[in-house]
Image: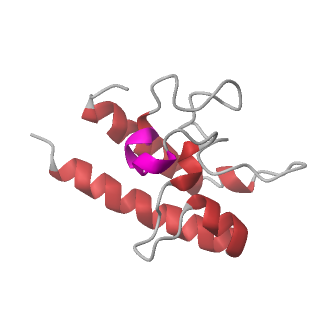
């Protein structure tokens, strides 16, 4: 996993751009999965997550970092909802809103740390 904060900042900006461009609403036989089917995923559905230096792993709670898809356990809301829990109990709009808010918060945090 790279420690370059600029790489993480760019990754989150790309993810936000993908979300805002409707990337999770592309037509098809199945809706795209948050993080897994976006520019953020270095695995793009092949291989095992976490083994190739995924920058998103730093947001996954330690107890879920060895899960088959760790990014589904990223906590998006202060109330504890994760990508996975919103798949199970939320709407597409709720998931996208939570992701958008989460991305804005993370971007502000990273930009505040810039020298």
Left or right? Give the position of 45 relative to 6: right
**Does residue 55 lie above or below 113 as drawn?**
above
**Which residue occupies 57% across, 35% down?**
41
Magenta stretch bounds = 56-64
Query: In the depicted view, which residue is nearer to us: 101 or 47?
Result: 47
**Does residue 54 lie above or below 92 as drawn?**
above
Question: Total of numbered circles in the picture?
Answer: 0
- Display colour scheme: secondary structure
Q: Residue furthest right?
A: 29
Residue 62 in magenta stretch: yes
Residue 15 in magenta stretch: no
**Which residue occupies 64% across, 39% down?**
68
Q: Residue furthest front?
A: 63
Q: Position of residue 89 (x, y in %)?
A: 69, 74
Q: Position of residue 73 (x, y in %)?
A: 54, 54
Query: In the depicted view, which residue is nearer to us: 69 or 26?
Result: 69
**Which residue occupies 35% across, 37% down?**
8
Left or right? Give the position of 9 relative to 14: left
**Which residue occupies 24% across, 55% down?**
109
Q: Is residue 91 visible?
A: no
Left or right? Give the position of 94 relative to 27: left
Q: Which image quadrant: the C terminus?
A: top left
Q: Residue furthest left?
A: 115
Left or right? Give the position of 81 relative to 47: left
Q: Position of residue 72 (x, y in %)?
A: 59, 52
């Amino acid at each position: 996993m790279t420690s370059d904060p600029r790489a993480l900042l760019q990754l989150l900006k790309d993810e936000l751009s993908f979300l805002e461009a409707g990337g999770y609403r592309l037509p098809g036989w199945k809706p795209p999965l948050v993080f897994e089917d976006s520019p953020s995923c270095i695995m793009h559905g092949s291989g095992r997550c976490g083994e190739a230096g995924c920058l998103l792993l730093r947001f996954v709670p330690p107890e879920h970092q060895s899960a088959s898809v760790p990014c589904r356990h990223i906590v998006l809301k202060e109330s504890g909802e994760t990508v996975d829990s919103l798949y199970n109990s939320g709407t597409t709009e709720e998931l996208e809103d939570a992701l958008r808010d989460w991305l804005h918060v993370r971007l502000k945090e990273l930009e505040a740390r810039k020298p």
